[in-house]
Image: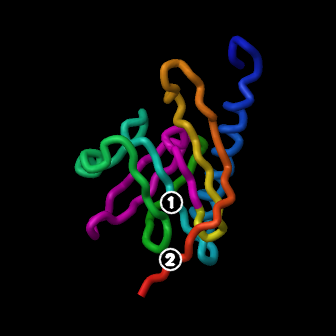
Amino acid sequence: MSAGGIDYGELMQMALRGVMQSALEIAMNEGLPGNHHYYITFKTEHPGVEVATHLKAQYADEMTVVMQHQFEGLTVDKDGFAITLRFNRKPERLIIPFDAVTAFVDPAVNFALHFQPHGDEEDGETMSPVSYTHLTLPTIYSV
């Protein structure tokens, strides 16, 4: 609890991070159903993030990963998740705390959550802690 009372923004953020955690647990236990796939954006310099040095050099501040067809070793716990993804055909293990995530999107159902990472207030000013968006995304065609 903050000095001024209940921090409802933080409570909302924790609850909606729980939605992301549950979605990742479904993928871990059952795989991704139907056309579901996740775009997950996170701060690469956030404490607890573990990313290969060459990827961190390429994505010094923020990185977006896609969980769709080719991912391995997904594990989820109360603090975050770990996953092996391929970059230039080479497997890389990523460890991402939930607090590092700034966006979680499932374009298959037009669902998005946007978070402010913990400790990321600018000039002491608290920003909107979380937002939910029901998106209408453009159709992307592949040949």
Q: Which residues are magenta?
A: 79-105
Left or right of 35? Residue 71 is left
Residues at badges 2 and 1 in contact (C-beta under 8 Å)?
A: no
Give the image location of residue 53, x and y in percent: 25, 46
Q: x, y (%) of residue 6?
A: 76, 22
Report which residue position mark 2 lands on: 140
Q: Is residue 65 left or right of residue 28?
A: left
Give the residue type that dot 1 points to. Answer: Tyr
Q: Is residue 97 magenta?
A: yes
Compared with residue 82, is residue 6 higher up or lower down, i.e. above or below?
above
- Could you tell me which residue is drawn at 42 percent across and 41 percent down? 43
Rendering colour mode: rainbow
Q: Nearer the viewer, residue 34 or 63?
A: 63
Looking at this view, name the residue that lies furthest to the top. Answer: 3
Q: Which mark, by number, is residue 23?
A: none
Residue mark closest to the camera, 2 vs 1: 2
Instruction: Determine which residue is flagged by label 1.
Output: 39
The answer to which quarter of the image holds residue 13 is top right
Quadrant including the N terminus: top right
Q: Main secondary structure of the magenta part?
A: strand
Give the crowd class for mark 1: few <14, some 14-19, many >=20 residues within 10 Å.
some
Q: Residue at x 28, y 70 (%)?
A: 89
- Hey, what amino acid is under mark 2? Ile
Which of pointers 2 and 1 lies earlier in the amino acid sequence?
A: 1
Instruction: Find the distance from the CA under tag 2 to the CA under tag 1.
Output: 15 Å
